[in-house]
Image (cartoon, rainbow, N blue to C red):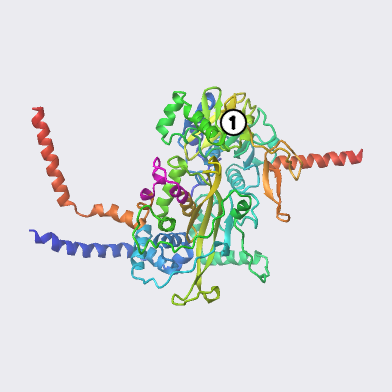
Amino acid sequence: MRANMHFAFFDEGSKKEIRRATLKAVAIPGYQVPFASREMPIARGWGTGGLQLTLSLIGKMDVLKVIDQGADESVNAVSIKKLVQETTGVQITDQTKDADLIQSRHRIPETPLTKDQILVLQVPMPEPLRPVEAREYMTKRMHSEDDYSGAWLMLFEQIVKYGRTATAADHPVYVNGRYVMAPSPIPRFDNPKMHLSEALILLGAGREKKIYAVPPYTTVESLAFEDYPFAVESFEGQECQLCGSAHVFLDEVIDQKTGKTVYQCNDTSYCMEQLNSREKAEVESNYA
Amino acid sequence: MGYVPVKGGTQAIAASIKRLTYERLKGEEILEINTILATMGSMVDQVMSESSLYSPELAALAIKQGEGSMEEAVFLMRAHRSTLPRHYYSEAVEAETMLVERRISASFKDIPGGQLLGATYDYTHRLLDFRLLEESAETNRGWLQDYQDSLPMIQAGQEVVYFPKVVDYLRQEGLFETYQPDNTRPTDVTKQSLQFPTTRSARLQVLTRGQTGAVTSFGYASLRGYGQVHPTVGEVRVGKMPIYTVQPNEMDQEPEDQFYIGEIRITEVESFVPVTVKNDENEDELEFEIGYGVCYGKNETKAIAMSILDQCLEHPNSNFPTHDEEFVLLHIDSVESTGFISHLKLPHYVTFQSKLDSIRQVKKGVQKVES
């Protein structure tokens, strides 16, 4: 009745199958490759797509970072890290630059990624055309015919209704000038980071059974009209209350004592790094 | 000959019921009601929720009698419920007064009062725990002792502090509309049949009585594309609510005259859903609305799905079945749906015979034309 655990949970056949789908995804940027998504020990919709990519790619020497909503210590990130570490024994890190495999939910780290890194994004809704067409059979055909009028019309309708595009996270992007892709629910703020990224970006949707990819140095353009250009979330005039960083994605937090709204870095590891480097600079200047 | 099936039917039923008893007894193990209550909490909660009867002991009995079948247990409870008189209605409860054991927000990191994870399967890895194969009461006692010893002593405070609602913070900002409490007497769906278009109170009752699986599926369908509601969970809370009643014949009913009749454990969900509203200048604007879900016991998936469907039904949309109140409300009830599906097992000899006849006649006609 008892069974021994495999390295990285999966049997080798499953890992190979997922890697083959991944290779196809890399070869056709932005195209959603169907794959036989496995049932995982965490719930569907909690990052099983990303986890399957991570487990199929990870080797004994890899260093893994897991982010959930910008934080390494967020409950789901901790849970995923624990699972990967228990089944592989790999090293875990919070430092973006030390990791060669980064699984993330909803964020691309503030620290620029390099060509030696792979970013795995967890995707709940891989189909950018789903809001305009509920049927999978139809959306697949629309992709094949390069028919993205629905996606454009959605943006156009928002402009007519609200005077501007009103997409939140997951603003659709054109990849390599061919496929329209859901960038996973990253904020619009992170969309430009995908453009000509040095790192390989893999996107996995476990529940919807799709893998897709943005290979390094691939063009990724956010859908927008010339007269209504794409705009990211605005944090103008705000900075992180902890490390003072501006031009990063900030979280709105209520100060429990004063009841006021304050801001702090969403990327907790980046914030820590800024704080540490500032402290180091202070110490050095004191010695000098 | 006509007499034989009737007689045989009586004997067959008796034998079948005997066989059923045999199937339950043949393993020669007895499942105590207390064992079910202590170890199958989720199932007890689901049965209470779907049967609209808050009684853990009776739910456990129904589970035992139904051999773990949800539909059977709910069926038994609902049938029993019909035998109970309704003496009075409770006073409306204010969910702020919940004694919270779990409270999380997926919308804000730092909610006033803080996040309280409580007990949850969410972050367990679903790996079969083979240690449970040889669990013993003795080791369990040891574990409990260690757990209790490791808990810090907490001095009880003098006053009860309640957790504020997450939505109140957003109300202050004007992102949610503030409504006056609607104190009109709710429709009681157990006393009146549903009339369409229905009232929100009736909708919420049908949704909360709905079959967990069906409510979840419909909520999921809306989320996935066959609907237009995709919420962010503002707050999920699980805890105990005190219930009060008043003497129904009392003329002036003061709050201090209320009787405390006990507490029930519930799951309550407030989902935030962006909707388009018209402002004073008749322009479209985005605003948040609340989808509301509540059910007996701890069943967060159902309560969240209910909050999605609540919003769907608040905004009828003929393009999507999940926004159609007749489609949703008339199909999610466990007893109604499983009952009618299983009626297909009853003999349909007469209807089938007449169907056969008409198909044969039609086929004959077709052949005649061809030849």
| Location of residue A97 with respect to B132 vertically, above or below | above
A51 within the magenta span: no
Dot 1 lies on which element? Answer: strand
Q: Which residue is mark 1?
A: A201
x then y, percent, for residue A56: 54, 35
Give the quadrant of residue A222: top right
In the image, B330 versus B59, the foreground residue is B330
B318 within the magenta span: yes
Residue at 35% x, 51% y: name it: B331
Decide if residue B356 is on the left or right side of residue B224.
left
* Whether residue A93 can be seen here: no
Q: Amino acid at mark 1?
A: Ile
In the image, B187 versus A189, the foreground residue is B187
User: Which chain does the numbered disc 1 sit on?
Assistant: A
Decide if residue B199 is on the left or right side of residue A118.
left
Magenta range is B309-327
* Whether residue B144 can be seen here: yes
